Amino acid sequence: MRFGPLLRILGTALYGFIGWELGVVLTRTPELAMDPWKLIVPFTLFGAAFGFLLAPWLVRAPAKAAHNALRQVPITDLVAGTIGVTAGLFMAALLSVPVSRLPAPFGNIVPLVLVFMFGYLGAAIFVLRQRDFFSLLRGGGEEKPEFAPPPVAVAPTAPAGPSLLLDTSVIIDGRIADIAKTGFLLGTLTVPRFVLNELQYIADSADSLRRNRGRRGLEVLDRLQNTPEATIVFVDQDPTDATQVDDKLISLARQTDALIITNDYNLNRVARLQGVRILNINELANAIKSVYLPGEEIPLKIIQEGKETGQGVGYLEDGTMVVVENGRRYINQEVLVQVTKVLQTNAGRLIFATPE
């Protein structure tokens, strides 16, 4: 649904009314000895034109921000806040009657202050205590037993899920910490001592780039330790049948029936050939990219030229490249494009589209 025409109508009416009021006020000024219509009509027309031209830009951004904010608010918070604002405004209305009898200017200012204060307090109290409020509405008349049996203690269970061995490359990459925070990793993240030693060796390197990469890996491990949704352990198992870190990871995974999480392409291929299961973060990133079908429309900002004549290229938020036929003339503009073809390549997904 497009709100542009509606915003223009509302803006024209609102600013036209403001211009009309301003013209009426100026006609009451003794210094301006003019006919009222010579002031009211021009100011009304100017205000209406101003609202017609600029209202969509003045109103669209706040309206879009409010729309996005309301979509993220839980329905219980929204209902509780509405009830709280209503109750607060009712209390402010009751108090405004005697307060309005105060001498000026307090009689005019204090009621307005009461409206904002009680409206905010009502919304804040009901949102913070919504659980008690709704439980009171549901079971306010039920009798509760005087004595309740003590809760039964449940012994903690061992963490479920397989053991997930972390490779040096995936730790330095850092995305594993964000994935773990979402709770999708249901296994135990395991960091062998030889991987930790390799990270420390990289962090102590004389090369500044390698040193920064190693330090970032150590910071990622610290984030994982402080993530409640993830369980991370450090083990001292060091297979003696291998010397390289990748070979030790594969050997340890075969001994403990664990999975390896990595971004290393060579380790991925070698481990699969030896029957070790691999979780590749890059494959996961490609798998969760947005899926578009031919005929769908998407907003896209075209930022550069394509390889073919007249083509424009833009990128989605997940990094997917979109090639727009006849899109060169829209460079540095955001346009609505229609998907015509989707290709899956070794480098990722490629989308072809045309301007709508």
Image (tube, grey):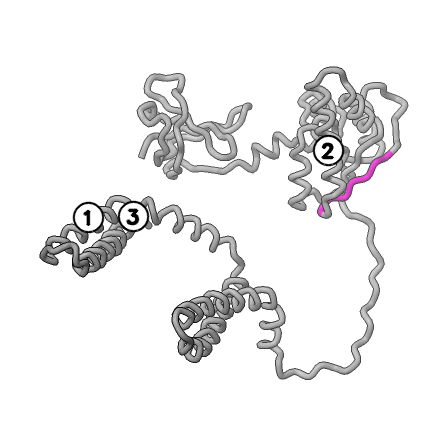
* Secondary element at image label 2: helix
Is 143 placed above or below 153 here?
A: below
Q: Is 263 rendered above or below residue 83?
A: above
- Which residue is more in the foreground, 39 or 153? 39
Which amino acid, by three-letter code, is at mark 2?
Answer: Glu
Residue position marked by numbered label 1 in the rendering: 46
Q: CA distance from mark 1 to mark 2?
A: 60 Å
Residue in the image at 90% along x and 23% along y: 240
Q: Nearer the viewer, mark 1 or mark 2?
A: 1
Name which residue lies at 73% across and 47% down: 228
Give how far across and how far down residue 55 sits, in percent. Answer: 29, 48
Disc 3 residue type (three-letter):
Ala
Report the magenta residues as a range. Answer: 229-235
Label pair 3/1, CB-CB below 8 angstroms = no
For the view shown, which residue lies furthest in the left direction? 35
Which kind of residue does numbered mark 1 sit on? Phe
